[in-house]
Amino acid sequence: MRTKRLWLPLLLLGFVVLVVWTGLGRGEASPQDNRIAIIMKTTDANSHYWQTVRSGALAAAKELEVALELSGPLRSIDSDEQARLLEKAIEQRPRAIVLAPIDEDALAPQLEEISRLGIRLIIMDTPLLHHRADSYVSSDHVEEGREAAGILAPGRKTRPVYAFLTSDEKSPVAMQRRNGVLEALPAGSAYNLGMINVGKSEEQAYRTVKSLTVAYPGMNGIIALTDIGVAGAAKALKETGLSGSVKLIGFDSSVPEIQLLEQGAMHALIVQNPFNMGFLGVQAALDSSGGSATVDIPSATITRANMYAPENQKLLFPFVY
């Protein structure tokens, strides 16, 4: 009887300890299991594209009932600040990190730490070339390049003489779009003036394109891989009276680009769906089923002729709809 009396309190004590330990463990894991960190390229309120990505992510977080910690540098070229924000997110040990990388090399230490800790990593917009990710959410940028080539040379009736404009020759997105164009327009069927760096300002892009129109009077196409290139090229073509004869093609959709399209100052925009990118990025972060590593978001070719179609208005003005 005495032995039984000793064991009974010990068993009860063990049960209480187990319950408390389990409760504490769940209390610590719960916030982490329900928390997702998103680090965008920029949180600039004037960035139409990234503000739309943000709206999509917030909509997904509300619908899926997850805690979202959203951040990003003010400037889309500030890779040092993005690295600092990513480091801060890692320290919080979220369930997953959704990242739109500015510069993969600058983020290398943080990307390796994410892999070491086993934090789920979702990459959106810009692919990683040298590090692992659990999922990639974006449009097919090579296919976007092919679409641009089709606009530049429909039916190949006229031999395209064209230039690429960029502000970052190392950008994976720019290179994929360029490769798509080159695949669709091989050297024998078109004359490519090369990848021309127009710098970081609209004024520099304007001067560069104006010089191109003088050096290559037969140029009939410009594929601008940056919104700075679009703005500078549109100004130069308008000033030289070439807006109608030189096709200007851009990507994504800032408010100034939409205005240029409406005015007929540019021929077409290849537009992604940034709202879907943000939404599906959060959704992919919660997917632990081992589903598709790539979530493709179809892009649309928008011209002055079709920009008022309801489906295209939703892409150009997502906050209105």
Image: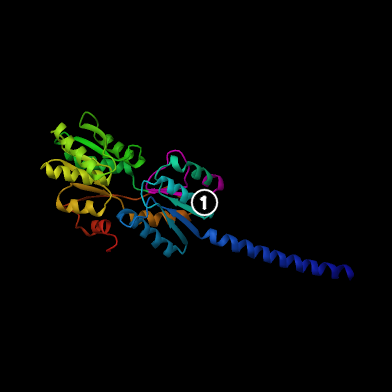
**Residue neighbourhood size for the residue with mark 1, other residues' Cα within 10 Å, grouped as few (<14), some (14–19), many (≥20):** some
Residue 237 or 270: which is nearer the viewer?
Answer: 237
Question: In the rendered image, is residue 292 in sight?
Answer: no
Q: Is residue 128 magenta?
A: yes
- Residue at 58%, 60% in the rendered image: 29
Q: Does 58 sit above or below residue 106?
A: below
* Quadrant position of the C terminus in the picture: bottom left
Question: In the rendered image, is residue 285 in sight?
Answer: yes
Provide residue 207's location: percent of width, then percent of height: 20, 39
Provide residue 44's location: percent of width, then percent of height: 34, 55
Determine the secondary structure under disc 1.
Answer: helix
Provide residue 166's location: percent of width, then percent of height: 28, 40
Give the magenta-colored segment's residue range.
Answer: 114-137
- Quick one: which residue is furthest to the right in this view? 2
- Quick one: which residue is furthest to the top in this view? 188
- Residue at 40%, 58% in the rendered image: 57
- Residue at 81%, 69% in the rendered image: 8
